[in-house]
Image (spheres, rainbow, N blue to C red):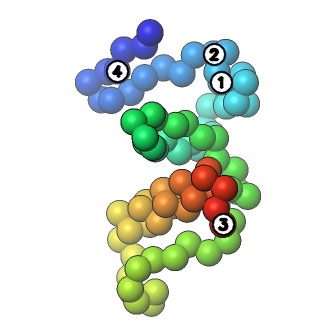
Amino acid sequence: MHKLTTKRQVTIPQSICQKLGLKPGDFIQVFERDGVAHLVKMTSDDLSGTIKLPGDTHQDLTREDTRKAIKNKTARKFAGES
């Protein structure tokens, strides 16, 4: 069992890091689906392609817009969608 810190951080067990090939500096995506938290190692291929934003695509993007778009793209990839 692992305890969540006050900064919402948790240590990933070494055995899990080894199975996923996680190394310091790697990017991961954490998201919830059906009450289960999923941790996915990200590669450049995982985020390749177009990220679609609602509304005008020529607008200035905020950091939050970009974060949401990447999160949605990751979730779709995980679900087997394009």
Mark found first going from the N terminus, 4 or 2: 4
Mark found first going from the N terminus, 3 or 4: 4
State the separation of the CA atoms marked 3 and 4. Answer: 33 Å
State the separation of the CA atoms marked 4 and 1. Answer: 18 Å
Q: Amino acid at mark 3?
A: Ser
Mark drawn on residue 17: 1
Q: Residue furthest top?
A: 1
Mark found first going from the N terminus, 4 or 1: 4
- Numbered label tally: 4
Q: Residues within 10 Å of mark 1 (few under 14, many from 20)?
A: few
Q: Residues within 10 Å of mark 3 (few under 14, many from 20)?
A: few
Q: Amino acid at mark 1?
A: Cys
Left or right position of 60 against 77 = left
User: Residue 28, how many percent across, how many down?
Assistant: 57, 42
Corner quadrant of residue 5? top left
Mark drawn on residue 14: 2
Query: Which residue is depicted at the point 55% across and 36% down?
Result: 39
Q: Residues within 10 Å of mark 2 (few under 14, many from 20)?
A: few
Q: Secondary structure at mark 3?
A: loop
User: Residue 17, how many percent across, how many down?
Assistant: 65, 24
Mark drawn on residue 4: 4
Above or below for 15 versus 67: above
Residue beneath label 3, please?
82
Above or below for 35 versus 72: above
Could you tell me which quadrant the N terminus lies in?
top left
Residue nearer the viewer, 60 or 18: 18
Asked if marks 2 and 1 touch (Cβ < 8 Å), the reply is yes
Visible residue check, residue 74 = no
Residue nearer the viewer, 25 or 40: 40
Query: Which residue is depicted at the point 26% across and 24% down?
Result: 6
